[in-house]
């Protein structure tokens, strides 16, 4: 038996190109359906777990999918904006605990999430070092964001402008890192958390500038009266909140009209949740209330449908590949007729020759299966993360 195995192995090594093609083809036949199934199942579990853990989302009327993806996974797509008054309305109803979300800006590709301290308790996020943000201009980094950006406590990150040429004159804001979260293996790991008012400052809705009543600001003053000071464009605006200038930061207008991308609502009980949903059921208010789990289930139904078509196509291709592999082996037997005849003439039995040929096939299948298993394990480890980033990008 060892001699038969040796001859089969040496033949495959000698014809390495043919062997490599056969091994690769059969490996793909085994791996593609299995790997695809692993990726879809894991992605479904990860997406569903976060959606189920989020009871209700309130946002402006528009695409429920954009609202959910932006609020739960911090994607770059910006949904229609709602107002801060929506959060106050939920709080005043006493039916749910509202948490603001304003996910619009980024820093070096990582989402800046404007929210409140209640978000950390809601997501059960723990601090690896530091503390939560306490004043304007402070931020807390997710574990993955901190590692990728190479920053730690006491360092700073700078918000990125939405466009290359910011005609509105909104300066990037320098954010002080005061806390780093432990890995949660969720999209929170890639986020930069700030107070929602800090997010409004990034947008330019709030700002701080030099004291116009001081003599050094005289050149920036156009006119002044007892109750009002009008400045020109030369007034110095601060792009970082410090203990020295924090008192100069202020907001204009009614905060109730300030934007949010969503309000995360935690009903006090099931009855309160039903009543709250009923208030948004008829529409016409300019706002919508969605259950993230329902929206994600609809998304996954679409993915599963696509998966079924892909698997069907893979099966058809696999059948064709298997037929081609069989044809290769049959043609190989014809080409090796003189070799087989020589083996028989020098004393090999027909059963030994048949066993050697069968062993060659078994070796190819075993190698292909081993590689397919290895690829499946890699897919099980990293596939869900890659497909989620692809789906949510």
Image (cartoon, rainbow, N blue to C red):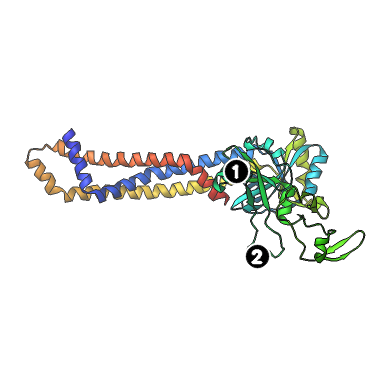
Quadrant location of the N terminus? Answer: top left
**Residue 67 appears in the picture as rendered:** no
Q: Could you tell me residue 388's position as x and y percent?
A: 54, 46
**Total marks in image:** 2
At numbered mark 1, what does the secondary structure look like: helix, strand or loop?
A: loop
Precedes in sequence: disc 2 or disc 1 = 1
Q: Position of residue 156 (x, y in %)?
A: 63, 49
**Residue appearing at x 10%, y 45% in the figure:** 341
- Number of other residues with Cα within 10 Å of mark 2, as a class: few under 14, some 14 to 19, many 20 or more: few
Q: Is residue 235 above or below residue 19?
A: below
Q: Which residue is mark 2?
A: 165
Residue 330 in sight:
yes
Q: Secondary structure at mark 2?
A: loop
From what the image shows, is residue 308 above or below residue 351?
A: below
**Residue closest to the eye, 149 or 298:** 149
Q: Which residue bears the numbered disc 1?
A: 152
**For this view, does 204 lie left or right of residue 381?**
right
Q: Is residue 355 left or right of residue 285?
A: left
User: In the depicted view, which residue is nearer to us: 311 or 252?
Assistant: 252
Label 2 – label 1 distance at C-alpha: 30 Å
Q: Toward the viewer: 45 or 352?
A: 45
Point out residue 121 in the picture as x, y percentages from the top left corner.
69, 35
Percent across and percent down for residue 21 are 30, 50
Judge from the rendering whether residue 326 lies leftward or rightward of residue 70; answer left or right: left
Q: Which mark is residue 293?
A: none
Work out whether residue 230 or residue 113 is closer to the camera in this orientation and state it: 230
Res 177 → quadrant:
top right
Contact flag, marks 2 and 1 (Cβ < 8 Å): no
């Amino acid at each position: 038996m060892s001699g038969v195995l040796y001859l089969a192995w040496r033949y495959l090594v000698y014809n390495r190109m043919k062997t490599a093609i056969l091994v690769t083809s059969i490996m793909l036949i085994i791996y593609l359906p299995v790997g695809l199934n692993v990726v879809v199942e894991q992605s479904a579990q990860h997406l569903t777990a976060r959606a189920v853990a989020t009871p209700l989302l309130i946002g402006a009327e528009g695409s429920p999918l954009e609202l959910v993806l932006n609020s739960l996974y911090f994607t770059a797509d910006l949904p229609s904006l709602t107002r801060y008054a929506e959060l106050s309305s939920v709080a005043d109803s006493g039916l749910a605990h509202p948490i603001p979300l304003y996910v619009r800006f980024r820093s070096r590709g990582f989402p800046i999430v404007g929210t409140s301290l209640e978000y950390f308790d809601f997501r059960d996020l723990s601090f690896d070092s530091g503390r939560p943000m306490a004043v304007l201009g402070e931020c807390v980094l997710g574990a993955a964001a901190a590692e990728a950006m190479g920053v730690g406590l006491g360092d700073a990150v700078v918000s990125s402008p939405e466009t290359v040429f910011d005609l509105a004159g909104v300066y990037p804001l320098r954010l002080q890192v005061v806390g780093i979260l432990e890995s949660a293996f969720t999209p929170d790991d890639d986020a930069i958390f700030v107070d929602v008012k800090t997010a409004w400052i990034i947008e330019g809705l709030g700002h701080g500038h030099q004291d116009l009543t001081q003599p050094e600001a005289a050149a920036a003053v156009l006119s002044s009266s007892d109750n009002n000071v009008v400045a020109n464009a030369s007034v110095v605006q601060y792009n970082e909140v410090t203990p020295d200038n924090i008192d100069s930061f202020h907001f204009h207008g009614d905060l109730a009209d300030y934007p949010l991308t969503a309000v995360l609502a935690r009903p006090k009980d099931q009855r309160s949740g039903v009543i709250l949903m009923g208030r948004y059921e008829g529409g016409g208010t300019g706002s919508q209330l969605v259950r993230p789990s329902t929206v994600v289930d609809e998304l996954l139904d679409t993915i599963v449908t696509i998966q079924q078509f892909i698997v069907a196509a893979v099966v058809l291709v696999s059948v064709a590949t298997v037929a081609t592999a069989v044809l290769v082996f049959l043609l190989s037997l014809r080409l090796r007729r003189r070799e087989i005849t020589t083996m028989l003439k020098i004393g090999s039995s027909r059963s030994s020759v048949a066993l050697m040929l069968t062993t060659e096939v078994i070796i190819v299948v075993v190698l292909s299966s081993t590689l397919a298993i290895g690829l499946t394990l890699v897919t099980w480890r990293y596939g869900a993360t890659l497909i989620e980033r692809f789906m949510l990008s």
